[in-house]
Image: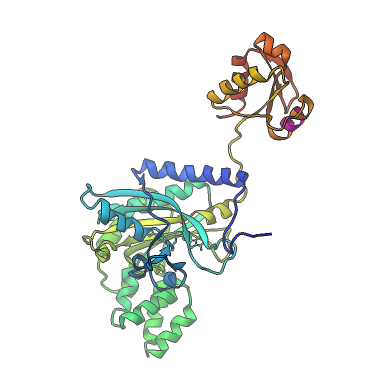
Amino acid sequence: MLQKPRGTRDFLPDEMEGRRAVEMKLREVARCYGYREVCTPEFEDLELFTMRSGEGIIEEMYVFEDKGGRKLALRPEITAAVIRMYINEAKVAPKPLRWCYFADCFRYERPQKGRYRQFWQFGVELIGADTAAADAETIMLASDMLNATGVTYELKVGHLSFMKNLVKDLEPAMQRRVRAHLDKKDYEGLNATLESLNRTDLAASLTALVNTRDLVEAFEIAGAIPEKERFEQTIKSLDAAGVKYSLNFGIARGLDYYTGMVFEGFAENLGAENQILGGGTYRLAHLFGGDDVASCGFAIGFDRVMVSLGDIKSAIVPVVGLVCTSEGRTRALVVAKALRDAGIRTEMDLMGRGLGAQLAHAAKTANFAIVIGQREAESGQVTIKNLLTAEQKTVDLAAAIAEVRAFGPG
Ligand code: HAM
């Protein structure tokens, strides 16, 4: 028996309905903030990602050559593609642009709970606003979106300048290595790297920075950072808007394109793979031949949110099993159309079953049975049976539709 590829999943209808319900909540919050959906290709030129996505991601990519010898990659994330599209299609559009997406990404990782080779992100990119207000609004949106899903989480906000300031006299490659250690919370590795450079002094300040939750103390440790006022302003706006977050100056972000403010969300009930959101301010456009536009965005790891939420009961939508005899079939087709036109999910027998077997099937799959026999075909009425209460009556079609509708939304 053939199986699905490692790290991928199948979703049965119950699970898909739960996923769609949560996706719709995310969409609604993004819409209220003015975000409009975009869509980019599932695969891109490899170069798009090798230019600035960080070494981790490059190792994890699905890379292939097409029949024309082009080097392509399945997208490991969507930010780079969105910025490429912005440069290709929308450079002159009025700023800021507020774009969102809900799409799948591919990373060749070791699969485990909450870590997949195909996974979905709900992301937003705010392009062309370079202010504290933009940074704060993006974090507010992240917080509102996670709140809308009902997930229990912690939001951590930091700024890369603190760490960058401390390591600024290291070689760029060493700076990147320090950042990678911090991103993986690999403090042993960090100490070893700094020891090999004879910079144990840095280990002490970096540890102090990672551990403090206090802005004033962070400024004392890191010294005069650029964007000090902007970051203070961002924090003030978050407080004014009542956003729940904590400061964390150890956030390093795995992708290389971030420039300043960074933030991450963590679900409380997940194990090792508990990061459900990541984002920050970044610059990518200049790498792809565009203007050096400042952007800010984040992506929610949709699958992890779903794991954290557990079983989702989607809204109860009534289902009608339309049951008929052969004499009633013509009339039943008219009734089915009327029910479907009224937005009611209606299923008719396609198996050539007799009346009893149709009713038994409806009892397993529907909330109501509507029966059309010869009597109903002649009278123009329908017999409706509530399959929960077993209550049955013969009424006009309009009354039956009203009764089904009253059962639940839809
Ligand atoms: P990222 O942190 O690499 O950022 O991914 C965002 C989220 O995707 C993670 O926080 C995590 O929840 C989820 N995720 C990542 N890898 C996997 C996986 N293998 N399986 C399941 N979920 C996963 C980005 O991708 C940036 N593009 C975010 C961004 C948008 N920054 C600015 N704009």
Return the x and y of residue 115 as percentages of the image width and height.
54, 63
Q: Does residue 253 appear anywhere in the picture?
A: yes
Residue 18 position within the rendered picture, expressed as x and y whole percent measured from the top left: 57, 44
**Main SS type for the magenta part?**
helix
Q: Quadrant of residue 404?
A: top right
Residue 191 in which image quadrant: bottom left
**In this orientation, which residue lies closer to the viewer: 268 or 99?**
99
* Residue at the image position 25 percent from the left and 64 percent from the top: 227
Please state which of residues 137 and 80 is positioned toward the viewer in this rendering.
Answer: 80
Q: Identify which residue, 205 or 127, lies in the foreground.
A: 127
Tell me, yes or no, if residue 131 can be seen here.
no
Q: Residue at x 30, y 58 (%)?
A: 84
Residue at image coords 31%, 80%: 172
Q: Quadrant where the C terminus lies?
A: top right
| Residue 224 at x, y percent in the picture | 25, 72
Residue 176 counted in the magenta span: no
Where in the image, quadrant-wise, is ligand 1 located?
A: bottom left
Q: Is residue 195 above or below residue 110?
A: below
Residue extending furthest toward the right: 356
The single residue placed furthest to the top in the displayed view is 379
Q: Verify whether residue 361 appears in magenta.
A: yes
Q: Is residue 385 above or below residue 291?
A: above
Quadrant that contains the N terminus: bottom right
Query: Is 376 placed above or below 277 here?
Result: above
**Residue 192 position in % (x across, y down):** 45, 86
- The magenta span reads 359-363
Instruction: Say how many tags the image has.
Output: 0
Q: Reply above or below: 26 against 360.
A: below
